[in-house]
Amino acid sequence: MNTTGEQSTPAELNSIEGFYFDTSIALSADVPESVLGEALARCEAYEKLLSRFAPGSDVWRINHAEGRPVTVAGDTLRILSCAEEMRRASGGAFNAAVGSILELWDFSGNTTVVPAEAALEEARARMEAAELDIEGNEVCIAQGTTLDLGGIAKGYICDRVADYLRESGARCGILNFGGNVATIGSHPQGRPWQVGIQTPSAERNQSVFAVVESSDNSVITSGVYERAFVLDGRVYHHILDPRSCFPSTSTIISATIVLRDGMVADALATALLILGVEQGFSLAQSYGAQALVMDAHGQVSATKGFPLLG
Protein backbone atom coordinates (compact mmCIF):
# COMPACT_ATOMS: atom_id res chain seq x y z
CA MET A 1 0.00 0.00 0.00
CA ASN A 2 1.33 3.46 -0.89
CA THR A 3 0.57 6.90 0.41
CA THR A 4 0.32 9.49 -2.31
CA GLY A 5 1.39 13.10 -2.36
CA GLU A 6 4.50 12.82 -0.17
CA GLN A 7 6.43 15.32 -2.29
CA SER A 8 4.00 18.07 -1.30
CA THR A 9 4.05 17.21 2.41
CA PRO A 10 4.19 20.52 4.31
CA ALA A 11 7.28 21.30 6.32
CA GLU A 12 5.38 21.21 9.61
CA LEU A 13 5.03 17.43 9.30
CA ASN A 14 7.96 15.51 10.78
CA SER A 15 8.62 11.91 9.78
CA ILE A 16 10.39 8.82 11.10
CA GLU A 17 10.90 5.28 9.82
CA GLY A 18 11.62 1.88 11.35
CA PHE A 19 11.20 -1.84 10.77
CA TYR A 20 8.88 -3.86 13.00
CA PHE A 21 6.35 -6.68 12.54
CA ASP A 22 8.37 -7.84 9.52
CA THR A 23 7.51 -4.66 7.64
CA SER A 24 8.70 -1.09 7.12
CA ILE A 25 7.04 1.50 9.35
CA ALA A 26 6.68 5.19 8.42
CA LEU A 27 5.14 7.78 10.74
CA SER A 28 4.42 11.41 9.79
CA ALA A 29 2.63 13.93 12.01
CA ASP A 30 2.69 17.55 13.12
CA VAL A 31 4.54 16.78 16.35
CA PRO A 32 8.21 17.10 17.37
CA GLU A 33 10.64 14.43 16.21
CA SER A 34 11.08 13.33 19.83
CA VAL A 35 7.39 12.40 19.98
CA LEU A 36 7.70 10.38 16.79
CA GLY A 37 10.72 8.64 18.29
CA GLU A 38 8.65 7.64 21.30
CA ALA A 39 5.88 6.44 18.97
CA LEU A 40 8.37 4.22 17.15
CA ALA A 41 9.64 2.89 20.47
CA ARG A 42 6.09 1.82 21.26
CA CYS A 43 6.09 -0.26 18.08
CA GLU A 44 9.12 -2.12 19.42
CA ALA A 45 7.41 -2.67 22.76
CA TYR A 46 4.28 -4.03 21.09
CA GLU A 47 6.34 -6.40 18.97
CA LYS A 48 8.00 -7.77 22.12
CA LEU A 49 4.56 -8.18 23.69
CA LEU A 50 2.65 -9.77 20.80
CA SER A 51 4.98 -11.61 18.42
CA ARG A 52 4.85 -15.38 18.61
CA PHE A 53 8.52 -15.40 17.67
CA ALA A 54 9.67 -13.22 20.57
CA PRO A 55 10.63 -15.40 23.57
CA GLY A 56 8.77 -14.20 26.64
CA SER A 57 6.04 -12.34 24.75
CA ASP A 58 2.46 -12.88 25.87
CA VAL A 59 1.73 -14.91 22.74
CA TRP A 60 4.94 -16.93 23.08
CA ARG A 61 4.08 -17.75 26.69
CA ILE A 62 0.52 -18.83 25.79
CA ASN A 63 1.85 -21.05 23.00
CA HIS A 64 4.38 -22.68 25.33
CA ALA A 65 2.16 -23.04 28.41
CA GLU A 66 0.96 -26.57 27.49
CA GLY A 67 -2.66 -25.61 28.09
CA ARG A 68 -2.11 -23.84 31.41
CA PRO A 69 -3.52 -20.33 32.09
CA VAL A 70 -1.20 -17.41 31.38
CA THR A 71 -1.57 -13.90 32.80
CA VAL A 72 -1.34 -11.36 29.97
CA ALA A 73 -1.42 -7.61 29.44
CA GLY A 74 -4.59 -5.66 28.76
CA ASP A 75 -3.56 -5.02 25.14
CA THR A 76 -3.20 -8.75 24.57
CA LEU A 77 -6.60 -9.44 26.12
CA ARG A 78 -8.31 -6.91 23.87
CA ILE A 79 -6.75 -8.36 20.74
CA LEU A 80 -7.49 -11.97 21.69
CA SER A 81 -11.10 -11.13 22.61
CA CYS A 82 -11.60 -9.46 19.23
CA ALA A 83 -9.92 -12.39 17.48
CA GLU A 84 -12.36 -14.81 19.07
CA GLU A 85 -15.30 -12.63 18.07
CA MET A 86 -14.03 -12.47 14.49
CA ARG A 87 -13.52 -16.24 14.39
CA ARG A 88 -17.17 -16.77 15.26
CA ALA A 89 -18.49 -13.98 13.02
CA SER A 90 -16.51 -15.22 9.99
CA GLY A 91 -17.42 -18.86 10.43
CA GLY A 92 -13.76 -19.71 10.98
CA ALA A 93 -12.39 -17.86 7.94
CA PHE A 94 -10.41 -15.78 10.43
CA ASN A 95 -8.76 -17.78 13.19
CA ALA A 96 -5.84 -16.60 15.34
CA ALA A 97 -4.95 -20.24 16.03
CA VAL A 98 -3.88 -20.57 12.38
CA GLY A 99 -0.27 -20.55 13.61
CA SER A 100 -0.62 -24.32 13.98
CA ILE A 101 -0.97 -24.48 10.19
CA LEU A 102 1.41 -21.65 9.30
CA GLU A 103 4.22 -23.59 10.95
CA LEU A 104 3.85 -26.29 8.28
CA TRP A 105 4.09 -23.97 5.29
CA ASP A 106 7.17 -22.09 4.09
CA PHE A 107 6.58 -18.95 2.05
CA SER A 108 10.06 -17.55 2.65
CA GLY A 109 11.25 -18.54 -0.81
CA ASN A 110 13.58 -21.22 0.57
CA THR A 111 11.36 -24.18 -0.37
CA THR A 112 8.46 -25.07 -2.64
CA VAL A 113 6.89 -27.92 -0.71
CA VAL A 114 3.24 -28.64 0.09
CA PRO A 115 2.92 -30.05 3.64
CA ALA A 116 1.88 -33.68 4.03
CA GLU A 117 -1.87 -34.22 4.23
CA ALA A 118 -1.60 -36.07 7.54
CA ALA A 119 0.33 -33.20 9.13
CA LEU A 120 -2.22 -30.67 7.90
CA GLU A 121 -5.11 -32.74 9.21
CA GLU A 122 -3.46 -33.05 12.60
CA ALA A 123 -2.86 -29.29 12.73
CA ARG A 124 -6.45 -28.57 11.70
CA ALA A 125 -7.77 -30.84 14.42
CA ARG A 126 -5.71 -28.99 17.02
CA MET A 127 -6.82 -25.63 15.67
CA GLU A 128 -10.51 -26.52 15.59
CA ALA A 129 -10.30 -27.55 19.25
CA ALA A 130 -8.49 -24.35 20.12
CA GLU A 131 -11.21 -21.99 21.37
CA LEU A 132 -9.57 -19.49 23.67
CA ASP A 133 -10.46 -19.61 27.34
CA ILE A 134 -10.32 -16.06 28.71
CA GLU A 135 -11.05 -15.43 32.36
CA GLY A 136 -10.10 -12.10 33.88
CA ASN A 137 -6.58 -11.39 32.69
CA GLU A 138 -5.72 -15.06 32.21
CA VAL A 139 -5.73 -16.86 28.88
CA CYS A 140 -5.23 -20.47 27.93
CA ILE A 141 -5.54 -22.52 24.79
CA ALA A 142 -5.31 -26.24 24.07
CA GLN A 143 -1.88 -27.81 24.27
CA GLY A 144 -0.15 -28.08 20.91
CA THR A 145 -1.99 -25.07 19.48
CA THR A 146 -0.11 -22.07 18.10
CA LEU A 147 -1.59 -18.58 18.20
CA ASP A 148 -0.48 -16.09 15.56
CA LEU A 149 -1.78 -12.50 15.69
CA GLY A 150 -0.35 -11.48 12.32
CA GLY A 151 -3.83 -10.95 10.89
CA ILE A 152 -5.05 -8.57 13.59
CA ALA A 153 -2.27 -7.13 15.79
CA LYS A 154 -0.88 -4.53 13.36
CA GLY A 155 -4.30 -2.91 13.07
CA TYR A 156 -4.52 -2.62 16.85
CA ILE A 157 -0.95 -1.34 17.24
CA CYS A 158 -1.37 1.24 14.49
CA ASP A 159 -4.47 2.57 16.28
CA ARG A 160 -2.70 2.76 19.64
CA VAL A 161 0.28 4.60 18.13
CA ALA A 162 -2.12 7.02 16.42
CA ASP A 163 -3.87 7.56 19.76
CA TYR A 164 -0.53 8.36 21.40
CA LEU A 165 0.24 10.92 18.69
CA ARG A 166 -3.17 12.54 19.13
CA GLU A 167 -2.65 12.70 22.89
CA SER A 168 0.73 14.32 22.21
CA GLY A 169 -0.90 17.10 20.18
CA ALA A 170 -1.04 15.72 16.63
CA ARG A 171 -3.82 17.28 14.56
CA CYS A 172 -2.82 15.66 11.29
CA GLY A 173 -0.71 12.70 10.40
CA ILE A 174 -0.43 9.40 8.58
CA LEU A 175 0.95 6.08 9.79
CA ASN A 176 1.99 3.48 7.23
CA PHE A 177 2.55 -0.06 8.51
CA GLY A 178 2.86 -1.70 5.10
CA GLY A 179 -0.66 -2.86 4.24
CA ASN A 180 -2.03 -1.01 7.28
CA VAL A 181 -2.53 2.75 7.13
CA ALA A 182 -4.09 4.97 9.79
CA THR A 183 -4.80 8.67 9.30
CA ILE A 184 -5.03 11.41 11.91
CA GLY A 185 -7.35 14.25 10.99
CA SER A 186 -7.11 15.57 7.45
CA HIS A 187 -4.19 16.44 5.21
CA PRO A 188 -2.60 19.83 6.12
CA GLN A 189 -4.02 21.20 2.87
CA GLY A 190 -7.52 20.63 4.23
CA ARG A 191 -8.46 17.64 2.11
CA PRO A 192 -8.69 14.00 3.18
CA TRP A 193 -5.51 11.97 3.12
CA GLN A 194 -5.09 9.93 -0.06
CA VAL A 195 -4.04 6.29 0.31
CA GLY A 196 -3.07 4.32 -2.78
CA ILE A 197 -3.93 0.62 -3.04
CA GLN A 198 -1.11 -1.46 -4.51
CA THR A 199 -1.71 -2.99 -7.94
CA PRO A 200 -1.21 -6.72 -7.30
CA SER A 201 0.64 -7.37 -10.56
CA ALA A 202 3.06 -4.44 -10.15
CA GLU A 203 6.33 -4.06 -8.28
CA ARG A 204 5.92 -2.74 -4.73
CA ASN A 205 5.30 1.03 -4.62
CA GLN A 206 5.27 1.29 -8.42
CA SER A 207 1.55 1.33 -9.23
CA VAL A 208 -1.84 1.70 -7.54
CA PHE A 209 -5.22 0.65 -8.92
CA ALA A 210 -7.29 2.82 -6.59
CA VAL A 211 -6.88 5.82 -4.30
CA VAL A 212 -8.88 5.96 -1.07
CA GLU A 213 -9.77 9.14 0.80
CA SER A 214 -9.31 8.86 4.56
CA SER A 215 -9.69 11.19 7.55
CA ASP A 216 -9.35 9.65 11.02
CA ASN A 217 -9.79 6.19 9.57
CA SER A 218 -7.84 3.00 9.03
CA VAL A 219 -7.28 1.71 5.49
CA ILE A 220 -6.11 -1.88 5.60
CA THR A 221 -5.32 -4.16 2.67
CA SER A 222 -4.74 -7.91 2.59
CA GLY A 223 -3.34 -9.42 -0.60
CA VAL A 224 -2.17 -12.78 -1.91
CA TYR A 225 0.64 -11.27 -3.98
CA GLU A 226 3.25 -10.59 -1.29
CA ARG A 227 4.51 -14.13 -0.51
CA ALA A 228 3.94 -17.22 -2.63
CA PHE A 229 5.58 -20.07 -4.51
CA VAL A 230 4.70 -22.03 -7.64
CA LEU A 231 4.69 -25.83 -7.74
CA ASP A 232 3.57 -27.92 -10.73
CA GLY A 233 1.98 -24.86 -12.29
CA ARG A 234 -0.10 -23.96 -9.23
CA VAL A 235 0.42 -20.83 -7.14
CA TYR A 236 0.45 -21.31 -3.37
CA HIS A 237 0.12 -17.99 -1.51
CA HIS A 238 0.41 -17.15 2.18
CA ILE A 239 -3.24 -16.29 2.93
CA LEU A 240 -4.29 -19.64 4.39
CA ASP A 241 -7.92 -20.61 4.84
CA PRO A 242 -8.04 -22.12 8.34
CA ARG A 243 -10.97 -24.31 7.32
CA SER A 244 -9.00 -26.12 4.59
CA CYS A 245 -5.39 -25.56 5.79
CA PHE A 246 -4.57 -24.50 2.21
CA PRO A 247 -4.22 -21.10 0.57
CA SER A 248 -7.55 -19.37 0.03
CA THR A 249 -9.30 -20.42 -3.17
CA SER A 250 -11.52 -17.37 -3.49
CA THR A 251 -10.93 -15.31 -6.63
CA ILE A 252 -10.04 -12.20 -4.58
CA ILE A 253 -6.37 -11.22 -4.73
CA SER A 254 -6.63 -7.88 -2.91
CA ALA A 255 -9.10 -6.85 -0.19
CA THR A 256 -9.23 -3.40 1.42
CA ILE A 257 -11.26 -2.37 4.45
CA VAL A 258 -11.92 1.22 5.59
CA LEU A 259 -13.01 1.58 9.22
CA ARG A 260 -12.02 3.69 12.22
CA ASP A 261 -11.21 0.55 14.28
CA GLY A 262 -7.99 -0.76 12.74
CA MET A 263 -8.01 -4.00 14.75
CA VAL A 264 -11.41 -5.01 13.38
CA ALA A 265 -10.48 -3.77 9.90
CA ASP A 266 -7.31 -5.89 9.90
CA ALA A 267 -9.22 -9.09 10.69
CA LEU A 268 -12.00 -8.21 8.24
CA ALA A 269 -9.54 -7.74 5.37
CA THR A 270 -8.19 -11.26 5.86
CA ALA A 271 -11.65 -12.78 6.28
CA LEU A 272 -12.97 -10.98 3.19
CA LEU A 273 -10.17 -12.30 1.02
CA ILE A 274 -10.98 -15.84 2.13
CA LEU A 275 -14.79 -15.62 2.11
CA GLY A 276 -15.21 -13.97 -1.28
CA VAL A 277 -17.24 -10.95 -2.31
CA GLU A 278 -20.78 -11.86 -1.26
CA GLN A 279 -20.08 -13.23 2.20
CA GLY A 280 -17.12 -10.93 2.77
CA PHE A 281 -19.01 -7.73 1.93
CA SER A 282 -21.88 -8.83 4.15
CA LEU A 283 -19.51 -9.43 7.06
CA ALA A 284 -17.72 -6.10 6.53
CA GLN A 285 -20.96 -4.14 6.39
CA SER A 286 -22.21 -5.82 9.57
CA TYR A 287 -19.34 -3.98 11.30
CA GLY A 288 -20.06 -0.69 9.52
CA ALA A 289 -16.99 -1.07 7.32
CA GLN A 290 -16.49 -0.19 3.66
CA ALA A 291 -14.78 -2.75 1.40
CA LEU A 292 -12.96 -2.79 -1.94
CA VAL A 293 -11.63 -5.86 -3.75
CA MET A 294 -9.84 -6.85 -6.94
CA ASP A 295 -10.25 -10.38 -8.27
CA ALA A 296 -7.86 -12.52 -10.30
CA HIS A 297 -9.39 -11.22 -13.53
CA GLY A 298 -8.70 -7.60 -12.60
CA GLN A 299 -12.32 -6.79 -11.82
CA VAL A 300 -12.79 -4.26 -9.00
CA SER A 301 -15.84 -4.28 -6.73
CA ALA A 302 -16.73 -2.08 -3.78
CA THR A 303 -19.45 -1.61 -1.21
CA LYS A 304 -21.80 1.30 -1.78
CA GLY A 305 -20.26 4.54 -0.59
CA PHE A 306 -16.66 3.32 -0.57
CA PRO A 307 -14.50 6.49 -0.35
CA LEU A 308 -12.67 6.25 -3.67
CA LEU A 309 -10.98 9.37 -5.01
CA GLY A 310 -12.38 10.49 -8.35
Image (cartoon, rainbow, N blue to C red):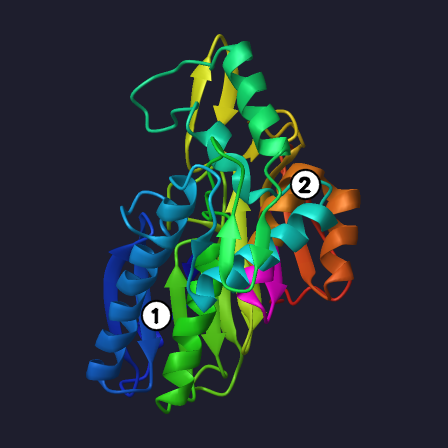
Q: What residue type is labelled 2?
A: Gln
Q: State the residue at coordinates (73%, 50%).
A: 89
- In the rendered view, tell whether residue 36 sits above or below residue 230: below
Q: Position of residue 53 (x, y in %)?
A: 31, 42
Q: Do the residues labelled 1 and 2 touch (CB within 8 Å)?
A: no
**Crowd class of label 1 (few under 14; some 14 to 19; many from 20; radius 10 Å):** few
Q: Residue furthest bottom?
A: 169
How far is disc 1 from disc 2 in space, using C-alphas?
28 Å
- 307 on left or right of 52: right
Is 259 magenta? The answer is yes
Q: State the residue at coordinates (45%, 86%).
A: 189
Q: Residue furthest top?
A: 232
- 145 on left or right of 64: right
Q: Position of residue 168 (x, y in %)?
A: 35, 89
In the rendered image, the quadrant that contains the C terminus is bottom right
- Which residue is denoted by mark 1 in the rendering? 6
Q: State the residue at coordinates (73%, 66%).
A: 288
Q: What residue type is labelled 1?
A: Glu
Q: State the residue at coordinates (58%, 55%).
A: 134
Q: Position of residue 290 (x, y in %)?
A: 69, 62
Q: Nearer the viewer, residue 166 or 27?
A: 166
Q: Earlier in the sequence, mark 1 or mark 2?
A: 1
- In magenta, the rendered stretch is 255-264
- Which residue is denoted by mark 2 in the rendering? 299
